[in-house]
Amino acid sequence: MKGSPLKTLRILLVLTAFLMAGMTAAFLLRPGSADAPSLGAVRLGGDFQLQSSSGPVSLADFRGHPVVMYIGYASCPDVCPTSLAVMTQGFRRLSDDEQARVRGIFISVDPERDSPEKLAEYSAFFHPNLVGLTGTREQIDQVVRQYGAYYRIAELDNSALGYAVDHSSRLYLIAPDGSLAEVLSHNITPDELSAKLRLLL
Amino acid sequence: MPSFSRFAAPLLASLLCVAGPALAEVTVSDAYARAVPPGQSNSAAFLVIRNDADEAVRLIDAASDSAGVVELHTHSEQDGVLKMRRIDAIEIPGRGEHSLAPGADHLMLIGLTRVLSEGDSIGLSLEFSDGQRLQLDVPVKSIMATMQGMQNGHQHHAE
Ligand SMILES: [Cu+2]
């Protein structure tokens, strides 16, 4: 029964280390809280290149403009259009001059269903300053990683949809210099969003 | 206990009489379907179902004249990740109501046979576990319009 107290201590220390490693991993791998532009030392954000209906687009093309970005998919019937409506209503709260300078980016993680042409039509429905982008799986996965987002294609055996896209739903507020200013909950109100945009104008 | 059955029989009979008209005890309010941008093949419909019967009833099927398939769906959120899934039934408690609302349960309109624009209406039929069927004419509302309405409401409060 009696083991050396030193050995017990060592086991305890090892267990504690494992526990802390697990907690750290869980923290770093979690889909992310709504207001953490950085997870520990990992800095979120950065440039990327995707495809629009009129050719390649990169975040650097938006230099000088505050940008609100959303990652979702167009056949999402509910959460995505609601978030995009919040985004574009936030734009409409601004004066005409201010509104002319803000930009919206909608990134679809479902290129199988969302062609750049379809996304252009979809985005124009919400606001003229909103562009719809998608890309190859590698390009999409890169942006998703860069911004701490999450998505997963879930096969649905029991639905005529065939598959659904599980995804995080946040608004990424990007400063005119291209840096990620803030990650916002999709529950933000248009008024709150327009106030945050004004600070970046 | 002969006296008990003498009372129980008419009581039972009157209960059965009440059960008859109960066939109209599920009602729907605030129903709308969401307008979609051109090119979209799916949309969703939302409504509030009220059940005035004592017993719970389940919505088990739905159909529309404007979509190939209508499915019962729900949303769940886990650690900030949203998942939409098909479900077999939506229960409406006895003497209660259940809202099908954005971000929660909804009727998924799959394979739209026409563009749903603000001001249109679509036919929607609902089937319940006790055999009740409701035939509805549901207005199409744009998300921008519903949201603007909401905000104007807020503004009004603030002023
Ligand atoms: Cu659905």
Image: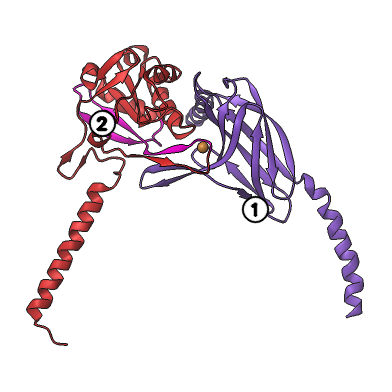
Chain colours: A red, B purple
Across and down, in percent, residue A44 comes to: 21, 36
Numbered disc 2: secondary structure: helix
Determine if the C-beta at disc 1 is less than 8 A from ligand 1.
no
Q: Residues within 10 Å of mark 2 (few under 14, many from 20)?
A: few
Query: Which mark identifies residue B85?
Result: none
Classify residue A138 by image quadrant: top left
Closest to the observer: B59 or B112? B112
Q: Which residue is mark 1?
A: B93
The residue sitting at 17% across, 41% down in the picture is A42
Numbered disc 1: secondary structure: loop
Determine if the C-beta at disc 2 is less than 8 A from ligand 1.
no
User: Can you say whether A42 is above or below A126 in the image?
Assistant: below
The residue sitting at 90% across, 70% down in the picture is B7
Position of the N terminus of chain A by quadrant: bottom left
The residue sitting at 10% across, 72% down in the picture is A10
Q: Are marks 2 and 1 on the same chain?
A: no
The residue sitting at 20% across, 19% down in the picture is A60
Q: In the image, what residue type sits under mark 1? A: Pro
Across and down, in percent, residue B131 comes to: 74, 47
Q: Which residue is mark 2?
A: A138
Q: In the image, what residue type sits under mark 2? A: Glu
Position of the C terminus of chain A by quadrant: top left
- Magenta stretch: give its range: A160-189
User: Can you say whether A134 is above or below B59 in the image?
Assistant: above
User: Can you say whether A55 is above or below A198 in the image?
Assistant: above
